[in-house]
Image: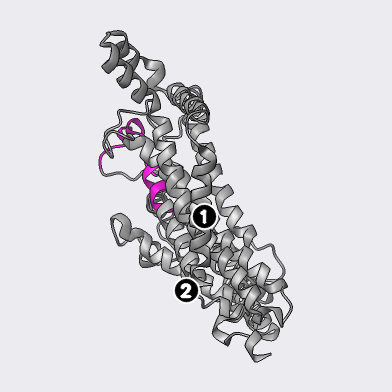
């Protein structure tokens, strides 16, 4: 039996798996993709339109419902006179990307507390939940209740919104209400970060998908609110994305700056979801194994092969998808340049400058032409041999550490 078992550090016990460098690597990749996605979303959807900014006098504070938190908090502080949380926690005492540091640290702390409550004993978890909920209720409602009860003992029963100052106790609820609004402004940017971190490190598939849905909702709402037909009726000051994709000037003329930003958002969403889901899937598989099977060399080898396959697909497939998508978006330009070089006619230049190809329709046409060419290449290239070479390479990679 000793020959059929493996050391403890290589077993499929959940406590051991969470310390495996490959599992931690996938979680770190997912976390990095989430943070990079937040930064990219702020650059794309975090500004107000120039006309909206120019409508305010120089030096005045303004706010539009963009994907950014400091502008809204500064505007809210100007409207209310103060904020409940200090500027250091909001990041208002910093500039640039440093404004994100303190809220991100708070998200990491909250994630660590949440994970600890999940893994701790039931009694400890219950006490932590009671302490947090009781502390929030005491901070929000206890001053109001004490003030009202004290006034009733002195002036008799009355509603808490009396006309006289000593009979009006609603002011004690102002801080909790302001705190809720502050959380709303912070949550616009950091709610998906908090849920994403909890999903990655707390192994929650539901929170992973919620983060994806949140970002897709932000993108969809921004597209609707910046549509020309909508802005003519209701202009909220959001800065629309350029209508034209622009000229491909990056990576040797492969992609345009706007295409690169949009492609980065899509790839980061996939990397975040794929790497986070891979960890959860492997953990679920290991948890369903019986106790003896977790130390069986055959099960361990199969598990390592699957884990190696996830890492290989994450790196290889995502890189391939990025390159092929960039080629598909600029495939029309490649065809026009090729035909122009072969024929030397003027029509290629006229087609290149056409408005249709510069708008979204042009990119749809480009992607369609690319798919047609790729489908036609199956009659020229030996795809079965190519895929066989790729699969054999992946199999050797998966079994390299078995």
Q: Residue 44: within the magenta?
A: yes
User: Which element is circle 2 on?
Assistant: helix
Quadrant in which residue 302 is drawn: bottom right
- Using the image as rendered, state which of residue 50 and residue 371 is in the foreground: 371
- Using the image as rendered, state which of residue 294 and residue 238 is in the foreground: 294
Q: Nearer the viewer, mark 1 or mark 2?
A: 1
Q: Is residue 367 above or below residue 280?
A: above
The residue shown at (39%, 34%) is 327
Q: Is residue 1 in sight in this rendering?
A: yes
Query: Which numbered circle lies on residue 38?
Result: none
- Using the image as rendered, state which of residue 20 and residue 208 is in the foreground: 20
Q: Choose the circle earlier in sequence order: 1 or 2.
A: 2
On the image, numbered disc 1 is attached to which residue?
A: 392
The residue shown at (43%, 51%) is 37
User: Which element is circle 1 on?
Assistant: helix
Boundaries of the magenta span: 38-58
Q: Tell whether 140 sits left or right of 261.
A: right
Percent of width and height locating residue 71: 38, 49
On the image, numbered disc 2 is attached to which residue?
A: 21
- The N terminus sits in image quarter: bottom right
Quadrant in which residue 126 is drawn: bottom right
Q: Main secondary structure of the magenta part?
A: helix
Q: Tell whether 306 sits left or right of 30.
A: right
Q: Tell whether 363 sits left or right of 97.
A: right
């Amino acid at each position: 039996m000793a020959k059929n078992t493996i050391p403890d550090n290589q077993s499929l016990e959940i406590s051991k798996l969470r310390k495996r460098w490959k599992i931690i690597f996938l979680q770190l990749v997912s976390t990095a993709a989430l943070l990079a996605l937040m930064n990219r979303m702020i650059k794309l959807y975090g500004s107000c339109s120039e006309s909206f900014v120019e409508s305010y006098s120089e030096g005045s504070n303004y706010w539009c419902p963009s994907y950014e938190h400091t502008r809204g908090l500064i505007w809210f502080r100007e409207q209310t006179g103060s904020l409940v949380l200090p500027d250091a926690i909001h990041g208002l005492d910093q500039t640039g990307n440093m404004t994100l540091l303190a809220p991100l640290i708070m998200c990491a702390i909250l994630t660590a507390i949440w994970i600890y409550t999940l893994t701790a004993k039931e009694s400890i978890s219950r006490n932590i939940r009671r302490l947090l909920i009781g502390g929030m209720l005491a901070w929000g409602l206890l001053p109001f209740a004490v003030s009202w009860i004290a006034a009733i003992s002195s002036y008799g029963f009355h509603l808490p919104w009396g006309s006289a100052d000593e009979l009006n106790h609603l002011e004690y609820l102002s801080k909790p209400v302001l705190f809720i609004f502050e959380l709303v402004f912070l949550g616009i940017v950091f709610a998906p970060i908090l849920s994403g971190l909890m999903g990655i490190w707390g192994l929650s598939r539901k929170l992973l998908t919620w983060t994806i849905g949140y970002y897709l909702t932000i993108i969809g709402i921004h597209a609707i609110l910046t549509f020309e037909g909508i802005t003519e009726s209701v202009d909220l000051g959001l800065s629309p994305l350029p209508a034209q994709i622009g000229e491909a000037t990056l990576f040797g003329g492969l992609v345009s700056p706007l295409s690169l930003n949009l492609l980065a958002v899509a790839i980061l969403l996939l990397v975040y979801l794929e790497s986070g889901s891979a960890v959860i899937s492997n953990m679920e598989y290991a948890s369903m194994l019986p106790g003896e099977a977790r130390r069986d060399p055959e099960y361990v080898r199969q598990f390592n092969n699957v884990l190696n396959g996830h890492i290989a697909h994450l790196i290889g497939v995502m890189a391939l998808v990025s390159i092929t998508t960039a080629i598909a978006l600029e495939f029309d330009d490649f065809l026009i340049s090729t035909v122009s070089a072969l024929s030397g006619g003027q029509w290629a230049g006229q087609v290149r400058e056409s408005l249709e190809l510069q708008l979204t329709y042009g990119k749809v046409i480009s992607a369609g032409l690319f798919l047609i060419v790729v489908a036609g290449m199956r009659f020229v290239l030996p795809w079965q041999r190519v895929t066989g070479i790729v699969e054999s390479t992946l199999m050797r990679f998966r079994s390299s550490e078995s």
